[in-house]
């Protein structure tokens, strides 16, 4: 296959080098279809100018991270594939620089969102927030400091507590929502984010008694559903590596209470069989009710030695948290919240698989109540289809039979339309009049579709080389106008079909255009077809 590709692309091109390196180093189980590689290489070939910086690089053994980031940000090309090309040429890529550029982009996005930020106002001692969200959903806490911000033209308050069960958005998991309350007031927390190592609670209202002790609680139902989806994401990641290969790595994720979204490295759309196998493995692990093994403050190097997978784009400190669901199945570095047992997830159902960028796929899935709702909706739809089909024993066979009948009827209808068009064409030819050296046909007709109108016009043009045809047509209840100029008459440039149809279209409150010899127009005013005939005679 690659021998054939050499004829399409230079063997030394970055595009072909990428394909060869990807095949060799990503250890794919077999070579993807020929057309996949052709598409991959064709896409990459568009970016040859950018890759020239890599191929001709000679002043250093390390490629600048901002070049790798530009390839990722501009062309959607994954960092690991850029690294593959670099290694093929004998040098490495500045990964730290790449992630710094990524961080800068995130900062720019945040800066765009936040227009104004006031100074922090201290309420109590400026202590570091104690996060207890792994064990508890609620606690008593005091406000440490707050400030007012304007975000997207909306005034909000950022509140920092001395203790909190609220998880701040991180690692793809959304921030918690919930309430701060006393006997006298109840303040809604609409989001939780991390800012400069602070856990920041967002509220539309500032508490009246800032010195009070508040009972703070997260939305437990929402958090538990998010935990289901986060733990399911870990199981999904492990299952994908088991089915597709060890080249699968996380490239991004979103975990909330409704859905999980997982981006991963892979070079072809997954087959139905692969998706089914992944789903089966995940649900098997859920039924095994595997206990969560959580290890905190593990030295980073030790965690890696345990086989823990790091997440794409995440920065880790000297000590990390390791989440394990069966040491032989799923071990990951993660700061998110998880279920105590996989059985809590209930069920996982994959709802879509798609492409995000070159070499990056995306799976969306639902769990627990979300999976049940998804299945119920589809079962209801299936029952409705079954009812429409008069409750056949084999729904698929019945649907296929109906489609075959439909196609057969469409073919018969097409033949009937053609026969009707031939009869109408002959009738129009019989009404043709010779006038001033050309054959004139100006008539009102009724046809089933636009194709019939077009076919009649071309058939008459083939019959009369000096034809001037103007048809005001009722096309299945909608007005259309068609103008056709014969080849001999067209050569005189006396009549221009496109210009004529624009004038005639005004009579049916429409518009259109076309070529000098043939043009059509559609409109809204069916009763204007008679006026088209009058206007046509005036134009002639």
Image (cartoon, grey):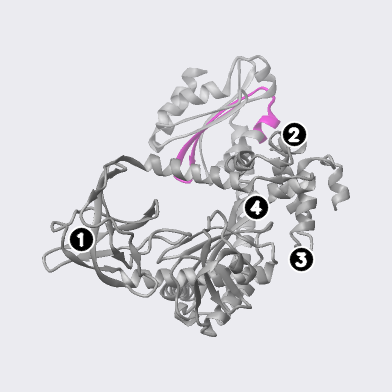
Foreground tag (4 vs 2): 2
- The residue identified by callout 1 is 187
Residue 216 vertical placement versus 533 (above, below): below
Could you classify mark 4 by the number of other residues whose Cα lies within 10 Å: few (under 14), some (14-19), or many (20 or more)? few
Dot 3 and dot 2 residues touching (CB under 8 Å): no
Instruction: Write down the region rendered in magenta.
Output: 459-484
Q: Is residue 156 left or right of residue 436?
A: left
In 3D space, how far apart are the residues under numbered discs 4 and 2 (Cα atoms)?
71 Å
- Displayed quadrant of residue 435: top right
Q: Tell me, yes or no, if residue 293 can be seen here.
A: yes
Q: Position of residue 429 (x, y in %)?
A: 63, 33
Foreground tag (3 vs 2): 2
The disc placed on residue 59 is 2
- The residue identified by callout 4 is 415
Q: Tell me, yes or no, if residue 405 can be seen here.
A: no
Helix, strand or loop at label 1? It is strand
């Amino acid at each position: 296959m690659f021998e054939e590709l050499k004829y399409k692309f230079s063997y030394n091109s970055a595009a072909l080098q990428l394909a060869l390196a990807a095949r060799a180093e990503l250890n794919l189980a077999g070579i993807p279809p020929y057309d996949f590689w052709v598409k991959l290489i064709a896409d990459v070939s568009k970016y040859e100018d950018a890759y020239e910086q890599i191929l001709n690089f000679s002043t250093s053994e390390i490629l600048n991270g901002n070049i790798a980031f530009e390839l990722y940000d501009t062309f959607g090309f994954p960092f690991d594939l850029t690294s593959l090309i670099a290694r093929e040429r004998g040098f490495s890529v500045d990964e730290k620089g790449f992630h710094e550029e990524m961080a800068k982009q995130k900062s720019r996005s945040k800066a765009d969102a936040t227009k104004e930020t006031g100074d922090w106002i201290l309420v109590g001692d400026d202590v570091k927030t104690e996060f207890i969200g792994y064990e508890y959903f609620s606690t008593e806490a005091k406000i440490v400091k707050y400030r007012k911000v304007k975000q997207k033209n909306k005034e909000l308050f950022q509140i920092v507590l001395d203790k909190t069960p609220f998880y701040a958005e991180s690692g793809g998991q959304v921030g918690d929502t919930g309430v701060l309350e006393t006997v006298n007031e109840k303040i809604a927390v609409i989001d939780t984010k991390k800012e400069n190592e602070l856990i920041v609670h967002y509220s539309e209202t500032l508490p009246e008694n800032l010195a009070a002790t508040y009972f703070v609680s997260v939305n437990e139902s929402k958090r538990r559903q998010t935990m289901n989806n986060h733990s399911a994401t870990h199981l999904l990641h492990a299952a994908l590596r088991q089915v597709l290969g060890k080249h699968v790595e996380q490239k991004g994720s979103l975990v909330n209470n409704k859905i999980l979204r997982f981006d991963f490295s892979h070079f072809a759309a997954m087959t139905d069989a692969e998706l089914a196998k992944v789903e089966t493995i995940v649900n098997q692990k859920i039924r095994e009710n595997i206990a969560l093994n959580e290890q905190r403050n593990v030295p980073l190097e030790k965690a890696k030695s345990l086989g823990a997978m790091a997440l794409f784009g995440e920065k880790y400190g000297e000590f990390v948290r390791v989440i394990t669901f069966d040491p032989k199945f799923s071990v990951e570095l993660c700061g998110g919240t998880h279920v105590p047992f996989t059985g809590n997830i209930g069920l996982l159902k994959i709802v879509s698989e798609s492409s995000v960028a070159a070499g990056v796929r995306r799976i969306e899935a639902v769990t627990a109540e979300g999976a049940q709702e998804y299945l119920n909706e589809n079962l209801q739809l299936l029952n409705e289809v079954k009812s429409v089909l008069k409750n056949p024993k084999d729904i698929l066979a019945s649907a296929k039979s109906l489609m075959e009948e439909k196609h057969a009827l469409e073919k018969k209808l097409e033949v009937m339309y053609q026969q009707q068009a031939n009869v109408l064409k002959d009738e129009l030819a019989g009404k043709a009049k010779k006038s001033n050296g050309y054959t004139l046909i100006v008539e009102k007709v009724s046809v089933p579709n636009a194709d019939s109108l077009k076919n009649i016009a071309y058939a008459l043009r083939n019959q009369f080389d000096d034809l001037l045809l103007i048809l005001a047509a009722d096309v299945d209840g909608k007005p259309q106008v068609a103008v056709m100029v014969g080849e001999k008459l067209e050569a005189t440039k006396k009549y221009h079909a496109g210009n004529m149809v624009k004038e005639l279209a005004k009579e049916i409150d429409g518009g259109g255009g076309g070529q000098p010899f043939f043009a059509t127009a559609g409109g809204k005013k069916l009763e204007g077809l008679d006026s088209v005939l009058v206007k046509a005679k005036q134009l002639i």
